[in-house]
C-alpha cells in the first residue's frame, strides 16, 4: 500500500528548501566566523546562534517530508562565498539572504496552493511568519548599525552594539509561539 501523502513535485521542492536552509546555516556560520575574527565576539556569537536556528529550519523540512511519506535528498552545500567587507556589508548581506529565502518560501506556498495540498500549505505558514521575523531581524541589525554610526561608528558604539547582540535572546516570539488562537 502506498502511504505517500505528498506529490513528487512538492517532495522535491521541500527537499531543495531543506538544503537552502542548510546553506543559510553555513552563511550565518561563515559571517559569525568573520565577525569573531574581526574582534566582534558578540556579533559573531549572535550570528553563530542564528546558524543553528537555520539548521533547525532544515530539520523541520526534513521531518515534514518524512512524515508525509516522502524522502528528502541531502545535496552538497555550496561555499558561502566571499565574506563581508564591513559590518554594514555583513548586515546587508544577511538581509539580502533573508529576502531571497522569503521568495523561495512564497514559491513553495504557491506550489502547495496550486496542488491543493492544504497540509503542506498549512505547514508552510509557520515559515511565512518566520520570514517576517527574519527580515525584521535583519532590518533591525542594519538600523542599529546606522544608529551607531555605520561604518564610521566610534569604537564605543561598536563595543556596545557587539555587547548587545552577544546578549540578545536566541528565540524571538513571533513564529515560535504562534497558534490559531494567537497568530
Image (cartoon, rainbow, N blue to C red):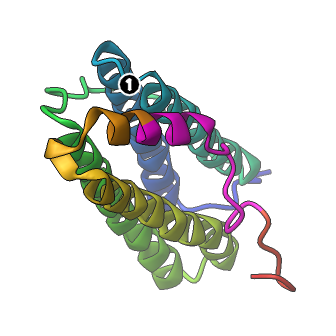
Residue closest to the eye, 13 or 136: 136
Q: Is residue 182 left or right of residue 130?
A: right
Q: Is residue 169 left or right of residue 81?
A: right
Residue drawn at x 31%, y 48% as measured from the top left: 94
Residue 160 picture quarter: top left
> Residue 93 location, x and y as percent?
23, 47
Residue drawn at x 58%, y 83% as measured from the top left: 116
Range of residues picked out in magenta: 160-176
170 is within the stretch colored magenta: yes
Check the image and name the residue furthest to the top: 37
Q: Is residue 90 left or right of residue 28?
A: left
Residue drawn at x 45%, y 66% as measured from the top left: 136
Residue closest to the eye, 183 or 47: 47
Residue 71 picture quarter: top right
| Count of marks overlaid on the render | 1
Residue closest to the eye, 12 or 97: 97
Residue drawn at x 41%, y 61% as measured from the top left: 140
22 is within the stretch colored magenta: no
The C terminus is located in which quarter?
Answer: bottom right
> Residue 20 location, x and y as percent?
39, 43
Judging by the rendered image, the residue that carries numbered circle 1 is 40
Amino acid at each position: 500500500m502506498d502511504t505517500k501523502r505528498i506529490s513528487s513535485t512538492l517532495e522535491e521542492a521541500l527537499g531543495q528548501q531543506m538544503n537552502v536552509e542548510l546553506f543559510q546555516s553555513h552563511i550565518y556560520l561563515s559571517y559569525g566566523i568573520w565577525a569573531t575574527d574581526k574582534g566582534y565576539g558578540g556579533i559573531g556569537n549572535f550570528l553563530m546562534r542564528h546558524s543553528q536556528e537555520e539548521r533547525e529550519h532544515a530539520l523541520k523540512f526534513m521531518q515534514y517530508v518524512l512524515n508525509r511519506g516522502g524522502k528528502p535528498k541531502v545535496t552538497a552545500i555550496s561555499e558561502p562565498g566571499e565574506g563581508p567587507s564591513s559590518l554594514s556589508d555583513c548586515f546587508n548581506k544577511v538581509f539580502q539572504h533573508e529576502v531571497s529565502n522569503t521568495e523561495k518560501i512564497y514559491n513553495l506556498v504557491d506550489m502547495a496552493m496550486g496542488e491543493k495540498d492544504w497540509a503542506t500549505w498549512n505547514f508552510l505558514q509557520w515559515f511565512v511568519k518566520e520570514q517576517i521575523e527574519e527580515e525584521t531581524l535583519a532590518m533591525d541589525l542594519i538600523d542599529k548599525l546606522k544608529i551607531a554610526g555605520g561604518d564610521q561608528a566610534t569604537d564605543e558604539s561598536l563595543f556596545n552594539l557587539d555587547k548587545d547582540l552577544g546578549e540578545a535572546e536566541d528565540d524571538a516570539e513571533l513564529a515560535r509561539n504562534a497558534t490559531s488562537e494567537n497568530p
